[in-house]
Image (tube, helix red, strand yellow):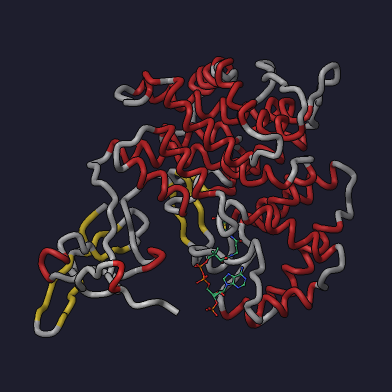
Amino acid sequence: MSKNTQNAILTIGDERYELPVIVGSEGERAIDVRNLRNDSGCITFDPGYANTGSCTSDITFVDGERGILRHRGYPVEQLAEHSSFIETVMLLIFGELPTQRERDTFREMLINQELLHEDLLHHFEGFPPYGQPMSILSAVINSFASYHPDLLDIQTPEEFRLAVGKIISKVRTIAAFAYRKSLGKPLVYPDPNRSYCANFLHMMFSIPYKEFEPTRAQVRALSLFLLVHADHEQNCSTSTVRMVGSTQANLFASISAGICALWGRLHGGANAAVIDMLESIRQGDLTVTEYLEKVKNKEMRLMGFGHRVYKSFDPRARILKQAAHDLLLEQDKHNDPLLEIAKELENAALSDDFFIERSLYPNVDFYSGIILRTLGIPVNMYPVMFAIGRMPGWIAHWAEENHGPTKIHRPRQVYTGPVQRDYVAIDDREPRG
Ligand code: CMC
């Protein structure tokens, strides 16, 4: 970060304030208002924080106008083509692509950490059979704080690496156990001889005496799905992790809060909402044209479309659209009706003024559900899959928040409620209609 030579000038009434302008490594400029309230008595007003930088960060660069996403400088397209999810995890969290030796050591760590503490399994018994996998994931990750008290106050790089290994490895096991619990199926333990993604698919779909052997294309599609979700700078769940972490809450509690933030339909719940939307069109509830009419009348949103930051295209959506095609081809499912409806919706929306004027394009969730569906993953697991992918981003941001000069996140507000009034005894209060 550098200081611009020019300052911003703000005039309020007769008062004039000079505000420094700071510049990021990609030339983005920000007006530094840190002293504004002290100097002027005013705060800035930005509901939804669309114009507010909450931190500086070295991790991920997004340029929404040009459809650019880079992690530690590397374009997501290059990572998707040449790298794997686990390499991207290491890049995000530790700052560099790993050497072969570092990669092997990390793999060893993931293998050592893949089992859950046996006592933790009782937690799964405590959830009802219809328990939501997202609530189970959030609760179990939060409970790590009780099972690993030695990692509550991480001080050394070794402790941090251990905590990272535990979360990145065990999150697969928790997710798969939550799924199997919801079906009343026996739990399948991890197999140390399988890769990260193959092992997850094994825990999801193997049954006693019949091991599930995923194809290379299935493993590749899952790795790509997780990779494109790995980080996306200050999105809602990551900002939540940073906010909770800014109180010096432990890593597990902060990540658990991030999972909860991700759950909503406008964030990590959107991939499931896309499949609901495509299914309802397939079942004939509405045609594509009728659906878009309702969207334009603001009766509903086109799920998987639009983004707070991307205003030309979402590079992740392009990668996943191709990956969905490749996976379906490999599975010999050339004509998935939902993929056809998705493409029809996309084409119709991209040539419609409503979407053009508002710069609405397919986002990462538009095609990701098709991949998950093709992999046989049920819809209530979709946000969980997003959470597994986003785990490295959350951890990297939590670490950055904790290693930097920490300041508790505490926005202000413009109060619009009643001005001071005096207490009225209950017998003297006016009846309300
Ligand atoms: N369908 C229809 N209209 C939309 C959509 C959409 N998907 N998204 C935005 N708009 C319209 C909105 O009605 C508004 O129109 P107007 O100016 O006439 O009032 C305008 O576009 C701006 O919308 P906004 O809500 O102010 O934009 P935002 O930046 O606050 O919202 C968003 C971003 C992602 C929440 C929103 O685009 C949306 O709801 N999309 C659908 C849900 C979705 O796919 N979410 C996944 C996001 S990507 C993965 C992730 O990060 O979680």
Query: Is residue 205 visible in the rendered structure shown here?
Result: yes
Residue nearest the observer in this picture, 276 or 321: 276
Horizontally, residue 174 falls left or right of residue 186, namely left
* x and y percentages locating residue 61 in the rendered image: 43, 52
Ligand 1 falls in quadrant? bottom right
Write the residue at 12% across / 73% down.
17
In the rendered image, the quadrant that contains the C terminus is bottom left
Write the residue at 61% across / 38% down.
82
Write the residue at 31% across / 51% down.
56
Looking at the rendered structure, the number of numbered marks drawn on it comes to 0
201 lies above or below 56: above
* x and y percentages locating residue 64 in the rendered image: 49, 63
Residue nearest the observer in this picture, 407 or 392: 407
* x and y percentages locating residue 101 in the rendered image: 50, 18
Horizontally, residue 35 falls left or right of residue 137, namely left
* x and y percentages locating residue 292 in the rendered image: 72, 76
Horizontally, residue 145 falls left or right of residue 305, namely left
Residue nearest the observer in this picture, 183 or 366: 183
12 lies above or below 307: below
Query: Is residue 81 visible in the rendered structure shown here?
Result: no
Horizontally, residue 123 falls left or right of residue 158, namely right
Write the residue at 51% across / 31% down.
141
